[in-house]
Amino acid sequence: MAQQKCVPVVNAARCKGCGLCVAFCPKKVFEADFEGKCIVKFPEACVGCLSCDYRCPDFAIKLVFGD
Ligand code: SF4
Ligand code: SF4
């Protein structure tokens, strides 16, 4: 059976560029842009640990699960 896939989706309007998601993602899925706001650089590396969703102080990240 294939492993369920997931990707983080960032609401750019909510992101204030604190860098927590970039710092704590164990798979380095995120990268900061020129303003420090996070961009989803390697979505295929996401393992669905939910760390980014829990840590974002602005509720800017949601995990979307699919197959
Ligand atoms: S769910 Fe985990 S692995 Fe996926 S982007 Fe968030 S912190 Fe990274
Ligand atoms: S944790 Fe949230 S507010 Fe901070 S950089 Fe990531 S998406 Fe933006």
Image (spheres, helix red, strand yellow):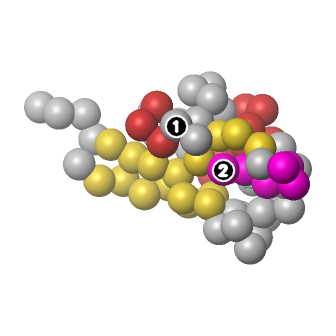
- Could you tell me how far apart the alpha carbons at marks 2 and 1 are, in whole angstroms? 9 Å
> Which residue is outermost to the top?
26
Q: Amino acid at mark 1?
A: Phe
Left or right side of 64 for 16: right
For the residue with label 2, is its CB less than 8 Å from the closest atom of ligand 2? no
- Answer whether residue 55 is visible to the viewer in this image: no
For image coordinates 73% across by 50% down, the residue present is: 38
Can you identify the residue that label 1 sits on?
42
Quadrant location of residue 4? top left
Q: Is residue 64 magenta?
A: no
Q: Position of residue 63 (x, y in %)?
A: 50, 55
Query: Is 59 situated above or below 65?
Result: below
- Identify the image quadrant of the N terminus: top left
In front of the other: 62 or 32? 32
Q: Amino acid at mark 2?
A: Ile
Q: Which residues are magenta?
A: 34-39
Can you identify the residue that label 2 sits on?
39
> Which residue is outermost to the left?
1
For image coordinates 85% across by 61% down, the residue present is: 16
Kindly report the secondary structure that dominates the magenta region of the rendered protein: loop
Query: Is 20 situated above or below 3?
Result: below
- Answer whether residue 21 is visible to the viewer in this image: yes
For image coordinates 32% across by 43% down, the residue present is: 5
In front of the other: 39 or 23? 39
> Which residue is outermost to the front?
34
In front of the other: 57 or 41? 41
Q: Secondary structure at mark 1?
A: loop
